[in-house]
Image (cartoon, rainbow, N blue to C red):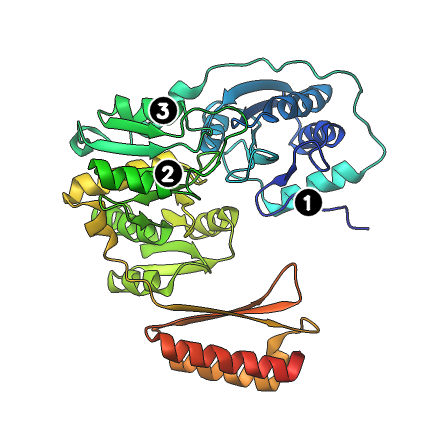
């Protein structure tokens, strides 16, 4: 019998206080993680959290279960997710755990696990933990969960980041606006950029435990955009609640997403001779305009499923330097195998300094292709290659798109829907072709 699924695409996620983030489940998860780690010597676990009010009790329950299995647990307190990944690797910890629900509202929380190498747990390890959780032959002790011993470890993480922007690439006095989403970067980001000589203005840097991501941060860059446009900043950077992603605003207040950041950073890594194997990784959601622009530079684009852990796995398998998502999760493997908003911001600033160009000018190299999204309800989710009428029209559309467009057809994971996405240089044509596919699906599967 297959154990119940606990981990989703980005760790364990839910409403704090309700399964799977109720106290007994969290405590048992802490114990199961330790049981799943390789034995031999002392198991050392590092835990960090964002600013949500539920983070403290979740940390205590998780640590209580881990200590019951013999682990030594250290709390790094409120730190960005990538800090836990970096410190777990550099500090010789057996694993690192981040308590965060990223860009979700404060009522939610989550648990992300990193190996001692600083990489997100693979699906194989996650399934192993779920199997241990489901095994009724063991239990965890009851009782109140005590506070977790803490240690200030953020210094080495900041030193690691500052090395990304050595002296020749620094721009003292440059005016920078940052939006910390009232989250994990609130104390770290202003300190980092000021130490590097920037003139920093910080928005949403006053967490209360309940205002994380509230109309701010990477999912709501409107306020940042207005400030940058009105007050003459060189650029703005908006982080999400746990600091593993960043969305940018150019000097005109225009939002610059992950696709544009991947392109400008790929070009700069190539110029510096640091782009390994002439390729980068992006997900199926990245616009085909990115693929076309990279092709012109002699850089291949490898696509993977949505989720930064899939980006990471593809990068490791192919030995690549850069990968990421349109949403702003960008991975620079030279520094860390997980998304890091601060690392991304420093690489963008490095590119601006090296090229002496503005963010608006650099981002203009990406010309997004028009995109059409269509949904069609189906009675069953069958392999479309086995439906001749649908397969035929899809093959014809792919041939018409050739190298100047993209067709992505997939079923919804939660609804009886088929999603059809087309990208190409002519919106009228791709709309027409998309409707032809939908019509064939309706005739065969609706």
Q: Nearer the viewer, residue 81 or 242?
A: 242
Q: 145 left or right of 360?
A: right
Question: What is the number of the mark on residue 407?
Answer: none
Tag 1's secondary structure?
helix
**In the shown orientation, is residue 144 left or right of residue 240?**
right
| Nearest to N terminus: mark 2 or mark 1 | 1
Residue appearing at x 28%, y 62% in the figure? 367
Task: Give the SS element for disc 2.
Answer: strand
Residue corresponding to mark 3? 158
State the image coordinates of residue 57 (x, y, percent, origin top left): 65, 22
Earlier-in-chain disc, 1 versus 3: 1
Quadrant where the C terminus is found in the figure: bottom right
Marks 2/1: CA–CA distance: 34 Å
Q: Are marks 1 and 3 in contact (CB under 8 Å)?
A: no
Q: Circle 1 sits on which residue?
A: 127
Q: Nearer the viewer, residue 330 or 87?
A: 330
Using a 10 Å C-alpha cutoff, classify the residue at mark 2 as few (fewer than 14 neighbours), some (14 to 19) or many (20 or more): many
- On screen, 148 above or below 251? above
């Amino acid at each position: 019998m297959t154990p119940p699924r606990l981990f989703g695409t980005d760790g364990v996620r839910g409403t704090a206080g309700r399964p799977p983030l109720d106290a007994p489940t969290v405590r048992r998860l802490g114990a199961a993680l330790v049981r799943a780690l390789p034995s031999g010597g002392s198991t050392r676990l590092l835990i960090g959290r964002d600013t949500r009010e539920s983070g403290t009790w979740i940390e205590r329950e998780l640590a209580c279960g881990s200590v019951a299995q013999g682990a030594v647990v250290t709390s790094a307190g409120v730190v960005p997710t990538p800090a836990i990944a970096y410190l777990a690797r550099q500090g010789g910890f057996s694993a690192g755990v981040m308590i965060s629900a990223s860009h979700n509202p404060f009522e939610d929380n989550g648990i992300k696990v990193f190996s001692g190498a600083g990489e997100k747990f693979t699906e194989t390890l996650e399934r192993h933990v779920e199997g241990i959780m489901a095994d009724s032959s063991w239990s965890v002790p009851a009782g109140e969960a005590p506070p977790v011993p803490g240690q200030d470890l953020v210094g080495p993480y900041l030193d690691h980041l500052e090395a990304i922007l050595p002296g020749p690439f620094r721009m003292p006095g440059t005016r920078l606006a940052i939006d910390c989403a009232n989250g994990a970067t609130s104390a770290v980001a202003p300190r980092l950029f000021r130490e590097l000589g920037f003139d920093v203005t910080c928005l949403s840097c006053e967490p209360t435990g309940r205002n994380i991501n509230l109309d701010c941060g990477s999912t709501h860059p409107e306020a940042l955009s207005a400030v940058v446009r009105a007050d003459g900043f060189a650029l703005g950077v908006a982080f999400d609640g746990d600091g593993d992603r960043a969305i940018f605003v150019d000097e005109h207040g225009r939002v610059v997403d992950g696709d544009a950041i991947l392109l400008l950073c790929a070009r700069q890594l190539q110029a510096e001779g640091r782009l390994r194997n002439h390729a980068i990784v992006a997900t199926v959601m990245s616009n085909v305009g990115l693929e076309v622009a990279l092709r012109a530079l002699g850089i291949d684009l490898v696509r993977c499923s949505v989720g930064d852990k899939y980006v990471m796995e593809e990068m490791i398998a192919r030995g690549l330097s850069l990968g990421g998502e349109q949403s702003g999760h960008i991975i620079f493997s030279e520094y860390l195998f997980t998304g890091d908003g601060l690392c991304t911001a420093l690489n963008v600033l490095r590119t601006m300094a090296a090229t002496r160009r503005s963010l608006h000018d650099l981002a203009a190299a990406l010309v997004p292709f028009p995109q059409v999204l269509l949904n069609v309800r189906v009675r069953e989710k069958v392999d479309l290659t086995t439906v001749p009428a649908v397969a035929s029209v899809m093959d014809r559309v792919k041939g018409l798109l050739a190298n100047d467009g993209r067709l992505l057809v997939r079923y919804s994971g939660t609804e009886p829907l088929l999603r059809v996405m087309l990208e190409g240089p002519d919106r009228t044509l791709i709309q027409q072709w998309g409707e032809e596919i939908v019509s064939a699906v309706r005739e065969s599967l609706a």
